Image: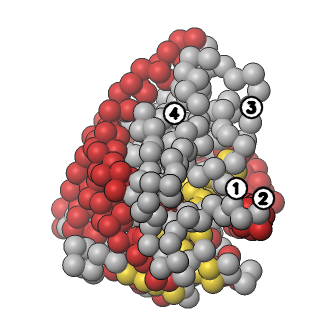
Amino acid sequence: MKLAFVSLPVSGHLNPMTALARRLQSRGHEIVLIGVPDAEPFAHAAGLEFVPYGEKEFPAGSTAKAWGEVARRHGLDVVRYSTQEKLPELIRLGLEYLPTKLRETGAEAVVLDTICFFHEIAPMSLGMPYVHIWNVLHVDFSGLTPMCFFSLPHDTTQEGLDRNAEVLRQVEPLFAPMIAAAMPYAKKMGLEIDWSDPGSTVSKLAVITQTPREFDFPGAPWPPQFHYAGPFHDDEGREPIAFPWDRLTGAPLIYGSLGTLVNGLLHVYRAILEAVEKLPETQLVLSVGRNLELEELGPIPSNAIVVRSAPQLELLKRATLTITHAGLNTALESLGQGVPMVAIPIGYDQPGVAARIAHHGVGEFVEVDELTAGGLRELIRKVSENPRYRERACYFRDVIARTRGLDVAADAIEQALGANQSANAARADRGRSLDLRPSDGRPPTSSAQRTVVRRRAAGQRQTRGKRPARETA
C-alpha cells in the first residue's frame, strides 16, 4: 500500500514515527511523510519521501520559535498553553491542506500521530482508512487509571477513583479550543461528529501505543483495536550528532536530558549540575537543548560535559543512570538498555511516565517544584547503589527486546488496513462501495453522498468511577 504518515513536527514524535515508517517501507509499502517544512530533515535522514504543506505559514525553522514559549512552563500550564495557543493553529493548517495532499500523493491510508488532534477529519472526508499512533503516553479518559498529565499513583480504591475523576474534570475543558478549531472543517466536509465523546474520531481500525503493556498501569478499558507495542527505535534513521567521545573518562556515566520541548527551566539544570558535582566518582553528560544560553548555567563541574544535543541511544549504551524529564522516548530508550532512572517530570505526559517509573521499580522521581540539588543527589545515590532498580530495568530491557515494538506495530497496521481493504472490496463487488467520492477525487457534495459519519465510542466509553468487568487491550 501507499501510506501517508502525519506527525507533530518535533523530534520526540518524528523520531518514532519515521522509525515505524521505515519498518513498513522495508516490508514493501510505499511511504510518504506529509508535514510542515521542519519535518523534511527527519524524512530525509530516514530515507522517506517528503511532501510539504504550510510553507507560507510554517517556513523552515519556525517550529522551534513557535514552541519556544513552552520551554519555560511546567505542570498543567504546559498542556493548557499548547491546547489553547499552538495546537488549534496546527489543526486548522492540517485540515486546510491535508485532503489535497492526500489526493495528490495517491495515498491509500494514513498513519496519524494522535497528537495531531482531529487531523483524521481529512481522511474521513475522503473515505480513506487511518490508524492512530501514540508516540507519547496514551491518555486514559475513563478515570479508571490516573490521567497522564498528573503523577498520581495507581490506586483502585474509591478514593483513588474519585481523585482520577477530579483531574479529569480539570483537563476536559482544555480540549475545547481544539474542538472549536476542527468543527468548521468537519461541517464543511459533511461530517457529523459527537464532540462530547473523546473517542468520536479515534480510528476504529487500530490505535497503537509504543508503551509496552508491562510498563502501563493495569485496568484501563481499552477498545478491541487498541494495541500495546514497544519502543519505536532501532538505532538507525536519525541525523548524526557530533559528540566529544574522547572526553569520556570511563567513570560511571550519568546521562541527563530534559528533551526538546519543555527544556528551558534553568533551575533544573543547575540542580542537576550541583547534585553531580558532589559525586566525583561519576561523570555526567547533560544535553540542554537550544532554549537557554549556556552561560546561564554558571560554572560547569569538572566531571560534567554539557552539550546542546547528544547521540542519546549511543550514550545510553554506556550509561549507568539516566536523569530524565520522563519523556516517553527517553524512558523507553533507557529501559531498552537496562538503565534505571531518576525522573524530574515537567509537563505533558511526563508525570504519568514518572509515576510508572516509580510503580514498576525502575527508578524514582521528584516533582519539579520540590527539586533541590541535595534531594536529587540522594535519589541518584539511592537508585545507583540499590541493585534492585537495575534488575527491574534489565527486566524491561528483556521485555522490550522480546516484544519487538516496531514489528508489533507494523503487523497491527498491516492487519487493520488489509482487513479494511478486504471489506471495501467486498462492498464494491456488491455495488455498495464505501468510497462515495466523485470520479474527480473531490469530497462528496450531494446530500446522498454526505452520509453521516459516526465515530462514537471508537475510543473509550465514559466509565468514570466504575471498575471494568475485565481488562481488555
**Label 2 amino acid?**
Thr
Q: Position of residue 140 (x, y in %)?
A: 54, 36
**Label 3: which residue?**
471
Marks 2 and 1 close (CB-CB < 8 Å): yes
Which quadrant would the C terminus be assigned to in this image? top right
Q: Marks 2/1: CA distance?
A: 7 Å
Callout 4: SS: loop
**Label 4: which residue?**
141
Q: Which of label 2 and label 1 is nearer to you?
A: 1
Q: Residue at x 46, y 64 (%)?
A: 444
**Label 1: which residue?**
229
Residue 288 position by quadrant: bottom left
**Label 2: which residue?**
403
Q: Residue at x 55, y 64 (%)?
A: 436
Q: Residue at x 63, y 61 (%)?
A: 434
**Label 1 amino acid?**
Ala
